[in-house]
Image: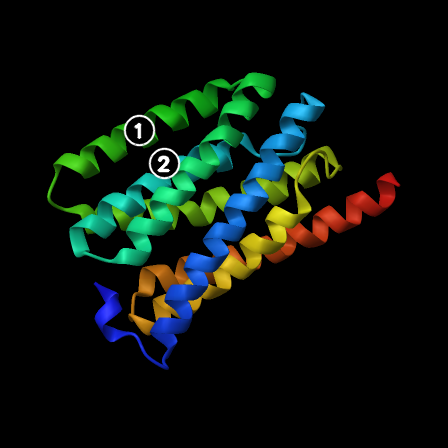
Amino acid sequence: MEFNQLGWNLLTLGLFGTFTTTLSLVWGLRYQSRNIIENKSGQSVSTVQFLYGVCSSMAAVVYGLGILKAALIINGSIMFVARFPVLRGLIRYKGLSVAEKATGTFLVMALAAMMVLPEKEGFYVMFQLGGIIFTVAQPWEIAKNRSSGVVEYRLLVVACVHSFFWLVYGYAIHNRVIIITSICGLMTNIVTILLWLKYRSSEK
């Protein structure tokens, strides 16, 4: 575990930064879930991104247990629990398209294989690199609808900071997969925020 390496270093900054922003993400996800329920709508919120997020959170837990990395285990567990209510609300009010059902089936099968097969790193890399593609789904959803919909702005801001601390953590442990995916996540979150601001201002 990383705790025996703590001190005045990047690892400590990244580790505690990811923990702190994960708790902030839980707060943001609660607001996102509330927005969906109160409006009885999931307009402009990407279902496939949350579907992927739920599965990738569990993949982080499985991989973290395999390599004994506390950040992956704790963050993955918390994010799985926090993202699930949002996904449930989206399924209730938006339903699932055929493509989303197929994507979900594939992700669950991949996750099951990851749990039983010894090559967990390969599966984790697949989930993380796939995440680069699926994070684009949120800004695309906003741009496609030309509306900010019920997307929670506070969640977008916290997610941006969260990606930054994962970048710091990835650099500290010299994990190229985490570094690359964190950079992509940071850039995508910034684009999503700019799109949200653009369409929110035109809706007033």
156 lies left or right of 168: right
Residue 140 seen: yes
56 lies left or right of 165: left
Q: Quadrant of the C terminus?
A: top right
132 lies left or right of 187: left
- Amino acid type for the residue under numbered disc 1: Val
Q: Is residue 46 above or below residue 176?
A: above
In the rendered structure, find residue 48 and report the number of the disc placed on it: none
Q: Residue at x 33, y 60 (%)?
A: 177
Q: Secondary structure at mark 2?
A: helix
- Amino acid type for the residue under numbered disc 2: Cys
In the rendered structure, find residue 55 and report the number of the disc placed on it: 2
Q: For the residues marked 1 and 2, what is the alpha-carbon distance in whole angstroms?
A: 7 Å
Residue bearing mark 1:
108
List x then y, in percent, for residue 8. 37, 82
Q: Secondary structure at mark 1?
A: helix
List x then y, in percent, for residue 56. 36, 41
